[in-house]
Image (cartoon, rainbow, N blue to C red):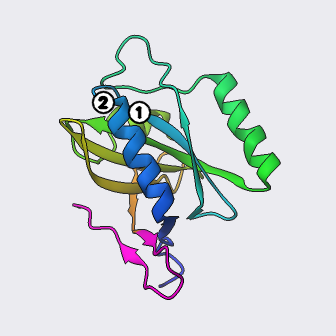
Amino acid sequence: MTESEPRPVRLTQAVLEEIRQEAARAYPHEGCGALLGPAPGHVRESLALPNQDADSPRTRFSVSPRDYMAVESAADARDVRLLGFWHSHPDHPARPSVTDRRYAWEGLLTVVIAVDHGTPRDITAWDVPGLEQPFRQLTLVVDAPDPESAPEEVSCPS
């Protein structure tokens, strides 16, 4: 990996399953949650959050300031960092939208999971490398639950 190449995003199998379950539960609306971990790109926990978008919850999500502050406090209490957020795209691909980019923050991950008729499908990870930059897709690696097993790279469409 060269210095200009982004590092992969690693998450545990348990985090992947939690995201899938929460995304399915939220269907037909967008589900969302926070991603926590000890270091950038190392997701070890997902905290489901209520989608506060009252106008278009099927195509938009929003996190309330109170929930954001609660996530920051939870991360501090666990001695980890807020690494970013995940959200689902009901009956749409796991690619960030123009609206997602408008609200994305440099330095925070954006993980998108497609939910097709209630069934979680592809999941992708993205970051914003600069203030005026477009999303950049990151490799997503799921760490095997058994320490002797090899990690699995999640197959996602480009």
Extreme bottom residue here? 148
- Disc 2 crowd rating (10 Å Cα; few below 14, some 14-19, many 20+) is many
Question: Which of 136 and 125 lies nearest the eye of the viewer?
Answer: 125
Specify whether residue 156 is in view.
Answer: yes
Q: Is residue 47 left or right of residue 78?
A: left
Amino acid type, residue under disc 1 in the picture: Gly
Q: Residue at x 34, y 16 (%)?
A: 56
What label does residue 27 carry, if any?
Answer: 2
Image coords of residue 2 (percent x, y):
49, 84
Q: What residue sits right under mark 1 in the picture?
A: 31
Residue 20 versus residue 102: which sits nearer the camera?
Answer: 20
Position of residue 76 in the picture relative to residue 153 (left or right):
right
Residue 146: x and y, percent?
50, 79
Instruction: Specify start and end residues of the magenta stretch as a single range.
Output: 141-158
**SS at circle 2:** loop
Query: To which quarter of the image does residue 53 belong?
Result: top left
Q: Secondary structure at mark 1?
A: loop
> Is 136 placed above or below 113 here?
below
The percent coordinates of residue 91 (x first, y second) are 19, 36
Residue 123 picture location, percent across and down? 33, 54
Answer left or right for 54 relative to 155.
right
Q: Nearer the viewer, residue 57 or 97?
A: 57
Whether the residues at callouts 2 and 1 have beta carbons within 8 Å, the answer is: yes
Q: Give the residue drawn at x 68%, y 38%.
A: 71
Residue with the most extreme front position: 146
Left or right: residue 92 versus residue 81 is: left
Q: Is residue 83 above or below residue 7?
A: above
